[in-house]
Image (cartoon, coloured by chain):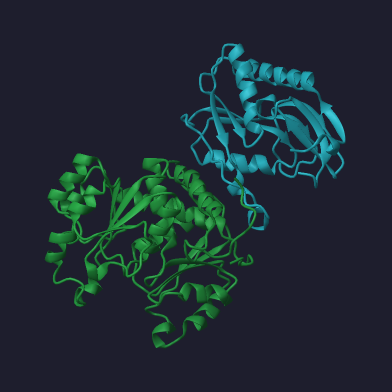
Chain colours: A cyan, B green
Amino acid sequence: MTSASDRIRQLLDAAGVARCLDGIAAAIHERWKDEPRLALVGVYQRGVPFARALRQRLRDRGMEPDFGKIDITQYRDDLQTMTVLPKLEGSEITFDLEDAVVILCDEVIHTARTTRAALEELLGFGRPRCVQIAALVDRAGRELPLYPRYSGIETDLPAGERVCVRFVDGDGVDEVFTCPWEKK
Amino acid sequence: MSLKTPRKDLLDIASLSDEEIEFVLANAVPFKDLFKRSVKKVPTLKGRTVLTLFYEPSTRTRSSFEVAANRLSADVTHFDIESSSVVKGESVLDTVETLESMRADYIVVRHKQSGTPNLIAKNTRASVINAGDGWHAHPTQALLDAFTLREKLRDLRGARALIVGDIQHSRVARSTSLILRRLGMSLAYLAPGSMMPRETPDEVGLFGNWDDALSWRPDVVYLLRVQSERLDEPFFPTAAEYHKHYGLTDARVGILRERGLWLMHPGPVNRGVEITDTGMNYERSLINAQVENGIAVRMSVLYWLRPGALEES
């Protein structure tokens, strides 16, 4: 995990993360409150706790969306040059994807290459009626024409910085900050 | 668990670290999950070329590798030995040079001569996967056997496997024994004296008949294929004689059923020799699971190996 000394600046504290999650959940609820086939699908790694946090908020509003996870490792174009070969987590879509409405959740959307890979992996499981994208942080710098329908904050950062998101669920704290790219 | 040191070739089980075995077996799980999807394909090896180079006949292993490579989106080509210049006397290394010029990324090799895959691996930047060499090794069979057993038994530590048949001349027995022992299983062999290995580790039990072997209380019985080419050699008198003494007869299937033992076989089977029709229909047979798991494990191996990586061994 990135240590405190690697931080450049904080973008959201715990209260800020909670506000963003509440706002995104409210927007999803507003649009899909009568939809029985709604599903939240998190992209590994932190898209998963992000999706779980949204699911909890939707449950609080009386909804019971399906839940899934997407592992995009095999869609990475740098797999053959990576020095550390990642273990595959494996995608888990246990609900019927046919005709479902999917909110694809990732903690950060930047170039959208991850999102493209996640879409490709998702569509391998079936044919949803509709897919929308939710991101806690929408960072400028799109390289592909994919945009989140729901996002917490928008930010534009220098090239040397990346966004680090931490969730209580897994990291012990809700927080968003920036750190140098090379420190991973 | 991620893996920090890339490996170029898979030549045997003995040279693998525990971490590497675990990595391949763990990743085979999500690869197997892929088979349930409507699209059974991922782009992992898109743009990569896998060449199958089989100097010995094989349908099952070769097809398994081809399906595995296809599901990873690799381009797969079979180098047809029968119609190639190999039959005109081209050496293995000349053939490898040709394949190198074709820019193969992975070469899957089967050869009757032990050590040929190692020789090829030293002379190509492609990743070489040993799909069986002589009596030496068949590492992907061993990995798929371990994966299949772990699906049923979860933890192999303390479990017992009885391997039956021509142990001495079997690369399957050699590699599978190695991996099962590495994963904590106890092993015993049941074979005619002429097919029993000359040297075995002290902790491996050796039996000459089924009664003694079954009283050792195995959890799984692993039958080896009787290699028909050996029927011409004086290892046992006839196929019927082998069946009577070492085959899984209907009566022995009854004992397996009574005790709930798992049954494995690397295929292809010789019905009426090492196994009967009843044995093939035995409800705790894992033979079909071995075939399906073979694809997942070979996908995992292809995902793991790195063409051009420095061979650390």
Q: Where is residue B272 in the image (x, y as percent from the top left)?
A: 15, 60
Residue B294 visible from this viewpoint: no
Position of the N terminus of chain B, as image quadrant, is top right
Q: Could you tell whether B264 is left or right of B92 in the image? A: left
Count of numbered tags? 0
Viewer-closest of B216 and A81 = B216
Residue shown at the point (52%, 58%) measured from the top left = B302
- Please identify the quarter of the rendering in which residue A169 is found: top right
Q: Where is residue A10 in the image (x, y as percent from the top left)?
A: 85, 29
Q: Residue A131 vs residue A22: left or right?
A: left
The quadrant of the image that shows the C terminus of chain B is bottom right
In this view, the residue farthest toward the bottom is: B89
Q: Residue A111, image x and y in percent? A: 74, 42
- Inspect this view and state whether residue B40 appears: yes
- Residue B242 rendering spot, x and y as whole percentages: 16, 64
Left or right? Give the position of B98 relative to A114.
left
